[in-house]
Amino acid sequence: MRRKNTRLIIIVLVILAIILIQLPFFSTFRDKIRIVISTPARIINSSFQSVKSNIKTISNIDTIVKENSELREQLLFTNARIAELQTVLQENIRLREDLKFSQSRPEINLVPAKIVNFSPSGAYQAITIGLGSEDGIKEGQAVISQGFLIGKVKNVSVKTAEVWLLTNRNVITPVRLTNSQTTGLLKGGIRGLVVDNIPVDTKVAKGELVVTSSLEGLYPEGIAIGEVIDIIHREEEIFITLRISTPINISSITYVFIVK
């Protein structure tokens, strides 16, 4: 009986509390309770949104870093392909020039040779080719690239041969000026390519083509070497010196042709 009375009292008190809370007297108290409850909720929600935003930002950064890495790899690959294609294109141009020269001089027998070693700097300027005595290579044979004389065979072994470049100070080449038909000796060295002892009254102009001379029997006649880029004359001397430039960049070629 006492338990039932207690339960009844609790129910009545709950009902009264609900009724009283709805009265205007308790509205201020109710609002304060709502504020107290809502403030932590807003803080928690704001913190959650901030954490969520940071996580999204970190995820975006990872994505950007990955994309940048992929783009960098693609760029490196593309640049490598461009360089490779440019090399092939330049080699194709050089081979076309070699073919053109071969067709224009059918009396000259040309043998292609791969360059296997470079030493084109310093006083001793030379390259090594992958042909030797077993291939019929002999000392003194002319070496051509793109229709221009670049040197001559010097030291020959069984499988390789050394080619001394025109710029080597030990190489002397008989040449002829195409306009005046004046002959001279082309020399290499620290001055570059020069032709000394040309008579002062010789009519020479910059840009005049210089070719090989066959007078001494060393080379076929008329193989291009380069052009005159400077004329050096001192008043007290009876000779002039010509500086010659060749268009061939030795470091960029991979094959040469031997005149047999």
Image: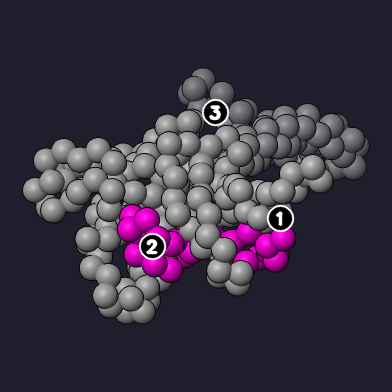
The residue that appears at 20% across and 40% down in the rendered structure is 156
Where on the picture, by quarter, is residue 119?
top left
Instruction: In this rendered view, identify the residue nearer to me: 82 or 58.
Output: 82
Give amino acid for label 1: Val
What is the C-alpha distance between the residues marked 3 and 1? 138 Å
Is residue 211 rendered magenta in the image?
A: yes
Question: Where, quadrant-wise, is the C terminus in this rendering?
Answer: bottom left
- Closer to the observer: label 3 or label 1? 1
Q: Please state the extent of the stretch shown in magenta in the rendering.
A: 201-228
Q: Is residue 6 depicted above or below 184 in this figure?
A: above
User: Dot 1, how many residues are within 10 Å of its Cα: few (below 14), some (14-19), or many (20+)?
Assistant: some
Residue matched to label 2: 214
Residue matched to label 1: 200
Instruction: In this rendered view, identify the residue nearer to me: 203 or 251.
Output: 203
Q: Earlier in the sequence, mark 1 or mark 2?
A: 1
Give amino acid for label 3: Arg
User: Dot 3, how many residues are within 10 Å of its Cα: few (below 14), some (14-19), or many (20+)?
Assistant: few
Q: Is residue 246 depicted above or below 209 in this figure?
A: above
The residue that appears at 38% across and 62% down in the rendered structure is 214
Give amino acid for label 2: Ser
The residue that appears at 57% across and 50% down in the rendered structure is 195
